[in-house]
């Protein structure tokens, strides 16, 4: 046995320097409360805040109430994972008095919830854990090469000036373990309903962890074995020791909405990434530095041709666009004469932005930019979108398809407490998301089913189908296992309405098929903490969340759940090294090649006039076989696919107020068996 | 800035030196397991059973195989479900205590296997399946009930070149601090700084105490002490048969290289290092195979197999390197030499060890001066304490049990005259073995009668069916004879819907009381969380019969309250029965299940030992110096406690034995009344000792017992006894 040589570098001083530099820039970052300590210091100081015995009892009792009575996935999770959370909480309740160690209590609570493998349902720790983030001075991401997973450092903190350990180096060993195994082990400890989602979440937490609802890292420092380009021996690697730091004041916090579907920990991590990297804390690569200047936030918003009004939500690019750091390259969106567009929906979280404003902004991007600049196809990227407002997600779908959108269906747990709450709701506060569930199915509630009848959360008429199709070209959707919750539902809708192909860098989306209610924000607010209420105010800053409503898909997959399984991609295209370090370059190019193969249909209403007998329209169709015009949803005229103008008579509709006029284009398509069908491929809606 | 030393070379240098002495060690390992040494000669020629050492990565790479067919996996899962559902006495209790559903978990695994088969997915490494099986079992936190991997995992032990112990820094009594120190190292392992008693601070970046907890969580024990104990073992050595291989290929060990002065227990920095300076060494996980580790079979076995396996491996790998400095006055290095010195060593040195205050010091034995702790105290009477260590209850046959019981008797008789003030029985780190062996020893330490622990079968349809068949077969029950004691439960328990059948002893009352008291002074028992299974039962019996004080270096024993049966043993017993659910396990896999749940007797009657163990009366935190020096502080402390206890004595001399009577002389100390009985029937009662007594006999043979009572207030208490078996020639 030959001894292996080992080069080692102690990265503790470098990290200290980088962290000092980070704090020095807190004004620039607009984070006045930003503070960073080492992990051991943080853990030591955390010992000073204690929950009393009564506090712990309240937490456990409220958790039992929420999971036992108000958790829509309970019977499914029991069966799928052979877990018994209620029993576990009861055990914890009996053991609370045995230990004075609060961290032990928090860990037991976290474990109970993580066993449900449902990031919607969570226990949130009090201060100082709440709002704290543990991080290493670099980011680690993974890609595939020749069927093997590789791990690469994609960023290091600014002023972490190591001659060799910098973006692009491959990480092979993590605290003595092969790095892939280290990710798997971490993933086991946190929620995730399927293999891809588990791995994704483990990966996200390798170097950044929100301490609000995940346990702090066990290790105080990590021994990272990495390979750099100067190593010639194919199995040699060097080791660097890097300490964990804990930051506070990074602007993370819980998102609240009556129709929330979000993975909070992931959403928090996205914000932290923004702080650490997006706003310039992480070094830009030399290449970027040379070519571009980082735009100030204000400049971004004024420059609406290049940036979204809500840059945290949407980012876009097209074949004729200007290249900017962090953006997909415009050249990657061009294939021959064909021009494609790219829109990234980074979150459906609408804090600080109105839901309607967000819908309008998406419409603006499509209408004002993509229709003209990306006529041949559009890439919608919802990778790593942790969700947010379900209504927002479902309101966007219509703009990409000629079809009418049927929102996803949701069901409540059919428990005695749920029935009680519903009946009380009826008499107290009718302006509630639960309202739809009240009344008509009170009989169904008695029938012993596990869940109530289903309802939509998004109003089909007033939200899901208000604008109709805006972008008419072919669309592909990019997903990964971090596309969670509202984004799962978005992806499900995308697939169920056959909007386009779904390309996954993972086999499926994250699998969060539910709407979450939080203890403080929803249950206590709606039902109070009076004597007649089962809810009790939670101590300190602790909180609980539970997947109150379980979603079901529509269309061909009607009745299928999203929870745990997610939405399956139509094809899988694992990330490459180029994707990670070159703005998803390979993935975007591949998506364009997929779009290239798809037919482009077009139907433009060039002129629109109201006459005494009806409506006169000039049309510009392309690739259509048939056109049908509708008034208030009634088919009035059918035309040949190449018709350039039409007069829509009011016949049969006289005296009725016409509110909307729509023109739909159809194309014949060959079915696999040789039959031909006429498919709806494009539509234009005009509101009157 | 901390430098990292690469310990890879040092570690492999150390194992490279091992094979030189391996055959002798292997022979020894086999011998202690009751296997003949001829077998070891066979092994010498057998290439495959040679001791070999590789890195964990090499081992796992070589072990990769896709041998398990779909049918094999299904059979394994099916048999696991049968064992847990039908033959596992703890199932309802474990379900309740840990909020788990192992059967459901196995069903889920079955679903996965079926799905993989139907999707014709590329078969993955067998280890993935094995891991899932081990996971399902380890949730039970019950080392009796296990899934064991086939070769090459079976018989393989993964280890680091060092081992740790937990001790307490007691230099500042107001701030007693837990310390984790190196107490084992491979004999050839040399590093400039990482030597014995180096204090470990971080383990792969994780604070060491947390690291121990984390590993314990995965393959844990039923209570906190057991978790810590097993965690500490698993951290540096693992039997790969029934515990998953370590995830790490290396461990980055951060430590302080203290040199500790054992007189004052104050740590001092070693060499040029200052006190706070820490160092890091990277140590490789290695895997040893061919160490002669084999699964222990026995009627009514109760043992923590993984602990036992690791102990055996340590015996071989770390021989002689386990902490401590001893005065060597007698040279007896080899087993043969030891056996020639019966006053220093037991005939079975791997089962028993002993020492007494006036004995000569010998290597691998505690110092006799430890048992003379009060020499320097002015008004102390001559110290005379004894110490007996029971290292294991492993016994492969009933003949062997008889021999071991006799050996214990011999040791006690040897120690008795020199240990008038008290005896320390040490069962720390004893992973168990034969329950009969354990229970038959108790009588020799106490004047009263021993009631053996009771054992319950799970009250399941399969057990009912078996009992029903036993009932029908009567005398001809054959392999089912084992179940005969519970035969009445055939009807009774089935009807009452209880979780368990009635409780029956595994050791007969006669066997448990055939010898009677041998050692007459006060006795104290030393336990730790490694006292598991048969040893739990021993400790339970010790406490339930109020034999003496139980002192723990942990708060309780390991908590294994059951008798285990191997799948193959069960198959053998149920051979030829109707509707047997037991089918052969494929691919060399093995399983064990806690078939019988134990219940305590006496004041704790009915209480279970599983998960909880036996609580000690007093806890003692060992310091580093004590760990290094045979727990001397603990022994001194226990001697002090024993010294406070009254010592009783009863010496019976048979003067004359005829067909009709026996004449004897009784010499007693601290005894107010002496009662002679034959076969449990009191015949003569006299008020004091020293006189000649004549006891009439009804038959020419019998168990003759003399009991000594002392008055305590209004009642008298049995304090000493002696038993003799009479037989008139």
Image: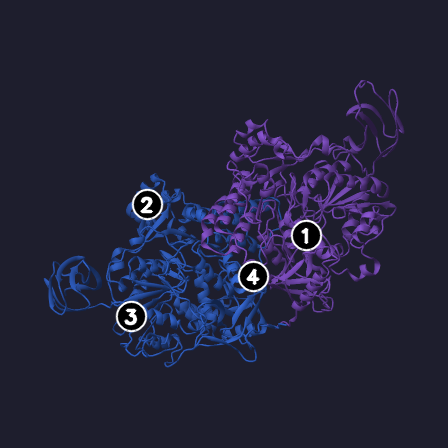
Chain colours: A purple, B blue
Q: Which sits earlier in the primary sequence, circle 1 or circle 4? A: 4
Camera-near label (2 vs 1) is 1
Residue contact between numbered discs 4 and 3, judged by CB atoms under 8 Å: no
Q: Mark 1 falls on what kind of element? A: loop
Residue annotated with mark 4: A44
Q: Are marks 3 and 2 on the same chain?
A: yes
Residue B7 spot, x, y in % from top left:
58, 72
Camera-near label (4 vs 3) is 4
Camera-near label (3 vs 1) is 1
Q: Are marks 4 and 2 on the same chain?
A: no
Mark 3 to mark 2 CA distance (whole Å): 53 Å
Which residue is rendered at x = 49% and y = 62% of the image?
A: B234
Q: Mark 3 falls on what kind of element? A: helix
Where residue B643 is drawn, which disc sits there?
Answer: 3
Where residue A251 is drawn, which disc sits there?
Answer: 1
The quadrant in which the C terminus of chain A is found is top right
Residue annotated with mark 2: B470
Q: Mark 4 falls on what kind of element? A: helix
Can see residue A212? yes
Q: Are marks 2 and 1 on the same chain?
A: no
């Amino acid at each position: 046995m030959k001894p292996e040589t080992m080069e080692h570098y102690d990265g503790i001083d470098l990290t200290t320097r980088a962290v000092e530099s980070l704090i020095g820039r807190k004004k620039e970052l607009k984070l006045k409360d930003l503070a960073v300590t080492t992990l051991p210091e943080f853990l030591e100081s955390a010992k000073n805040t204690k929950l009393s015995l009564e506090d712990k009892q309240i937490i456990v009792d409220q958790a039992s109430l929420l999971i036992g009575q108000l958790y829509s996935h309970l019977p499914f999770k029991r069966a799928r994972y052979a877990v018994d959370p209620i029993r576990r909480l009861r055990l914890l309740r009996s053991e609370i008095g045995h230990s004075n160690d609060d961290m032990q209590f928090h860990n037991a609570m976290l474990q109970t919830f993580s066993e449900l493998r449902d990031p919607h349902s969570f226990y949130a720790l009090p201060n100082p854990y709440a709002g704290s983030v543990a991080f290493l001075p670099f980011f680690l991401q993974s890609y595939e090469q020749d069927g093997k997973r590789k791990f690469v450092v994609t960023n290091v903190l600014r002023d972490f000036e190591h001659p060799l350990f910098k973006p692009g180096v491959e990480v092979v060993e993590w605290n003595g373990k092969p790095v892939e195994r280290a990710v798997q082990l971490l993933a086991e400890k946190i929620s995730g309903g399927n293999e891809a989602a588990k791995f994704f979440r483990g990966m996200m937490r390798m170097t950044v962890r929100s301490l609000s609802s995940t346990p702090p890292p066990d290790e105080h420092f990590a021994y990272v074995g990495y390979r750099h380009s100067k190593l010639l021996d194919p199995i040699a690697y060097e080791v660097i020791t890097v300490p964990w730091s804990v930051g506070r004041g990074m602007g993370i916090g819980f998102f609240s909405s009556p129709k929330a579907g979000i993975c909070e920990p992931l959403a928090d991590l996205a914000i932290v990434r923004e702080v650490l990297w997006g706003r310039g804390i992480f070094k830009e690569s030399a290449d970027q530095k040379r070519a571009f200047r980082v735009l100030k936030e204000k400049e971004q918003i004024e420059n609406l041709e290049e940036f979204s009004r809500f840059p945290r939500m949407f980012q876009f690019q097209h074949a004729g666009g200007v290249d900017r750091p962090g953006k997909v390259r415009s050249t990657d969106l061009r294939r021959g004469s064909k021009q494609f567009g790219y829109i990234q929906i980074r979150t459906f979280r609408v804090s600080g932005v109105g839901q309607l404003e967000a819908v309008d902004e998406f419409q603006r991007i499509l209408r004002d930019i993509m229709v003209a600049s990306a006529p041949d196809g559009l890439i919608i990227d919802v990778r790593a979108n942790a969700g947010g407002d379900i209504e927002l997600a479902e309101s966007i779908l219509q703009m990409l398809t000629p079809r009418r959108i049927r929102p996803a269906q949701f069901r409540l747990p059919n428990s005695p407490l749920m029935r009680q709450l519903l009946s009380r709701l009826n008499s107290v506060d009718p302006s509630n998301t639960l309202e739809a569930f009240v009344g008509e199915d009170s009989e169904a509630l008695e029938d012993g089913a596990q869940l109530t009848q289903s309802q939509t959360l998004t109003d089909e008429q007033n939200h899901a189908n208000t604008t109709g199709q805006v972008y008419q070209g072919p669309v592909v959707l990019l997903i990964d296992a971090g596309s969670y919750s509202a984004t799962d539902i978005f992806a499900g809708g995308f697939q169920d309405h056959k909007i386009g192909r779904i390309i996954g860098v993972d086999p499926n989306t994250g699998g969060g098929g539910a709407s979450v209610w939080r203890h403080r924000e929803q249950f206590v607010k709606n039902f109070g903490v009076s004597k007649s209420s089962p809810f009790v105010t939670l101590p300190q800053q602790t909180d609980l969340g539970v997947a109150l409503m379980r979603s079901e898909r529509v269309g061909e997959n009607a009745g299928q759940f999203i929870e745990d399984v997610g939405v399956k991609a139509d094809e899988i295209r694992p990330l490459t090294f180029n994707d990670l370090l070159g703005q998803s370059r390979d993935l975007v190019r591949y998506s364009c090649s997929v779009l290239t193969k798809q037919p482009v249909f077009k139907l433009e209403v060039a002129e629109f006039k109201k006459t005494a007998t009806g409506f006169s329209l000039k049309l510009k169709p392309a690739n259509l076989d048939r056109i049908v015009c509708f008034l208030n949803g009634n088919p009035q005229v059918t035309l040949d696919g190449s018709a350039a103008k039409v007069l829509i008579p009011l016949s049969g509709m006289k005296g009725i107020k016409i509110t909307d006029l729509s023109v739909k284009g159809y194309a014949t398509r060959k079915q696999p068996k040789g039959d031909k069908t006429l498919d709806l491929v494009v539509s234009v809606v005009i509101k009157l | 800035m901390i430098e990292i030393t690469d310990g890879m070379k040092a570690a492999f240098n150390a194992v490279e030196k091992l094979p030189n002495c391996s055959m002798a060690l292997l022979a020894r390992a086999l011998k202690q397991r009751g296997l003949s040494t001829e077998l070891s000669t066979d092994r010498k020629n057998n290439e495959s059973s040679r001791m070999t050492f590789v890195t964990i990565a090499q081992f796992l790479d070589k072990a990769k195989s896709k041998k398990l067919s779909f049918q094999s996996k299904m059979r394994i899962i099916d048999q696991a479900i049968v064992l847990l559902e039908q033959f596992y006495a703890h199932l309802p209790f474990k379900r309740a205590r840990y909020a788990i559903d192992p059967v459901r978990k196995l069903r889920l695994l079955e679903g996965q296997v079926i799905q993989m088969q139907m999707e014709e997915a590329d078969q993955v490494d067998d280890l993935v399946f094995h891991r899932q099986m081990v996971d399902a079992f380890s949730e039970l936190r019950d080392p009796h009930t296990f899934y064991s991997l086939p070769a090459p995992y079976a018989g393989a032990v993964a280890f680091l070149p060092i081992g740790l112990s937990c001790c307490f820094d007691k230099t500042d009594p107001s701030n007693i601090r837990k310390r984790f120190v190196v107490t084992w190292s491979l004999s050839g392992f040399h590093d400039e700084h990482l030597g014995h008693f180096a204090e470990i601070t971080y383990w792969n970046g994780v604070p060491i105490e947390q690291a121990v907890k984390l590993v314990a969580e995965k393959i844990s024990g039923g209570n906190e002490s057991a978790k810590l104990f097993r965690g500490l073992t698993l951290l540096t050595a693992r039997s790969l048969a029934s515990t998953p291989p370590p995830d790490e290929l290396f461990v980055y060990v951060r430590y302080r290289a203290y040199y500790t002065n054992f007189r004052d227990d104050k740590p001092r920095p070693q060499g040029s290092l200052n006190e706070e300076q820490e160092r890091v060494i990277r140590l490789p996980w290695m895997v040893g195979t061919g160490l002669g580790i084999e699964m222990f079979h026995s009627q009514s076995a109760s043992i923590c197999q993984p602990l036992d396996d690791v102990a055996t491996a340590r015996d071989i790998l770390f021989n002689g390197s386990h902490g401590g400095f001893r005065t060597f006055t007698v040279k007896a290095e080899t087993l043969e030499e030891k056996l020639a010195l019966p006053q220093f060593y037991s005939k079975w040195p791997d089962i028993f060890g002993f020492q007494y205050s006036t004995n000569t010091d010998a290597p691998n034995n505690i110092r006799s001066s430890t048992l003379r702790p009060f020499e320097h105290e002015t008004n102390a009477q001559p110290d005379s304490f004894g110490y007996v260590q029971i290292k294991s209850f492993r016994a492969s046959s009933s003949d062997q049990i008889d021999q071991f019981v006799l050996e214990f008797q011999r040791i006690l008789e040897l120690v008795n005259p020199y240990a008038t003030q008290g005896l320390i029985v040490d069962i720390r780190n004893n992973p168990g073995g034969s329950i009969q062996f354990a229970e038959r020893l108790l009588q020799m330490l106490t004047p009263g009668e021993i009631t053996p622990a009771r054992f319950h079968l799970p009250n399941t349809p399969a057990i009912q069916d078996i009992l029903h068949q036993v009932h029908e077969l009567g005398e001809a029950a054959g392999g089912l004879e084992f179940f005969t004691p519970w035969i009445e439960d055939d009807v009774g328990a089935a009807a009452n819907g209880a979780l368990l059948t009635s409780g029956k002893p595994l050791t007969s009352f006669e066997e448990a009381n055939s010898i009677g008291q041998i050692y007459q002074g006060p006795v104290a028992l030393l336990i730790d969380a490694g006292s598991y299974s048969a040893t739990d039962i021993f400790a339970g019996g010790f406490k339930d019969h109020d034999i003496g004080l139980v002192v723990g270096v942990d708060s309780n024993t390991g908590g294994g309250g059951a008798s285990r049966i191997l799948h193959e043993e069960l198959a053998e017993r149920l051979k030829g029965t109707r509707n047997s659910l037991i089918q052969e396990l494929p691919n060399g896999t093995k399983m064990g299940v806690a078939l019988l749940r134990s219940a305590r007797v006496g004041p704790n009657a009915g209480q279970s030992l599983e998960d909880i163990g036996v609580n000690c009366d007093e806890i003692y935190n060992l310091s580093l110096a004590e760990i290094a020096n045979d727990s001397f502080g603990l022994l001194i402390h226990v001697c002090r406690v024993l010294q406070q206890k009254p010592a009783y004595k009863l010496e019976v001399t048979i003067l004359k034995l005829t067909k009709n009577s026996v004449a004897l002389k009784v010499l007693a100390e601290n005894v107010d009344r002496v009662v002679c009985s034959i076969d449990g029937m009191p015949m003569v009662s006299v008020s004091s000792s020293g006189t000649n007594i004549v006891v009439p006999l009804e038959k020419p043979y019998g168990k003759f017992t003399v009991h000594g009572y002392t008055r305590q207030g209004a009642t008298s208490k049995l304090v000493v006894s002696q038993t003799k078996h009479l037989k008139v020639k």
